[in-house]
Image (tube, grey):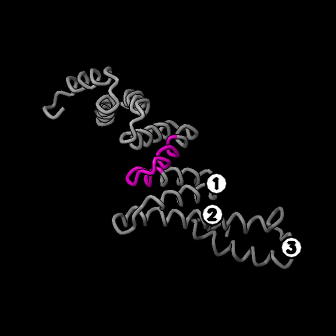
Amino acid sequence: DDAGDVAGAREADRAAIATGDAEYGARAAYHLALTHERAGEHDEAEPAWRVVVDFGNPAYLPPAHLALARLADDTGDFDRAREHWEETVATGDREYGPLAAHDLAQRLLERGEPARAQRVLTAGLRLVDRASAPHAHSRLAVALGIACLDQAIGAFGAALGTAGEPADPEVGPLATELLARTLPLRGRDGEA
C-alpha cells in the first residue's frame, strides 16, 4: 500500500484475513476497509468493516462500528446506524465514542427525541477528558444544551392544551412565555 500497489495490498489483506488470526486478521480487515473507504468504494467497504467486527478484536471495534454507522446513515437506515453508534459508545473508546455520541445525538434531535439524545451525549461526555480534548468536550456540551432546550420546549408545550390553549389557567401563561423565549433559540421564530 505504501508503494502505491493498492491491489497488491488488498490481496495481502485477504490472505491475512483468511488466517483467522485475531490480531493480524483483524488488522488486515481494518486496512482493507480503509483502502475501500479511501477509494470511495462504500459497497466494498461495508463488508470489510463487518469482517473487522466479526473478528471481535477490541482495538478495531470502535472505528469499525463508527464506519458502519456512517455507511448505514448515508443510506437512510437509522435503526442500523443507531445500533452501530451505540456499539461504538459502549466500547468506551475515548477517540471514537464521542464522535459516535455526537452523530447519534444529532439524528435523535432531528427525529424529535431529545431525551434519548441527552442520555447519549451524557455517555459521550463521560468518555472525554476536557483538558486533553477541549474541542470534543465543547461539541458534546453544546449538543447536550440543545437537547435540553428541545426537551424544555416539549415540556412547555405539554403544559398547553390542544391548539395552544392553556390547560391550567395559572401555568398556561408561564408556559406560553417560556415557549416564546426558547423557540427562537432553536430557530423557530414563527412558532414563537
Residue ID for mark 1? 112
Quarter holding the C terminus? bottom right
Q: Is residue 176 above or below residue 57?
A: below
Residue bounds of the magenta highlight: 84-100
The residue type indicated by label 1 comes to Gly
Residue ID for mark 3? 168
Please report the residue visible at 43 percent of the width from the left and 52 percent of the height from the top: 99
Please report the residue visible at 28 percent of the width from the left and 31 percent of the height from the top: 24
Q: CA distance from mark 1 to mark 3?
A: 25 Å
Which residue extends farthest left? 3
In the rendered view, does 5 fall on the left or right side of 79? left
Please report the residue visible at 57 percent of the width from the left and 65 percent of the height from the top: 187
**Contact? badges 2 and 3 (CB < 8 Å):** no
Secondary structure under tag 3 reads: loop
**Contact? badges 1 and 3 (CB < 8 Å):** no
In the rendered view, does 77 fall on the left or right side of 63? right
Q: Indicate the position of residue 105 as horizontal and vertical percent values.
A: 54, 54
Precedes in sequence: disc 1 or disc 3: 1
Q: Indicate the position of residue 18 as horizontal and vertical percent values.
A: 32, 20
**Contact? badges 2 and 1 (CB < 8 Å):** yes
**Mark 1 residue crowding within 10 angstroms, few (<14) / some (14–19) / many (20+):** some
Q: Is residue 2 above or below residue 88?
A: above
The residue type indicated by label 2 comes to Asp
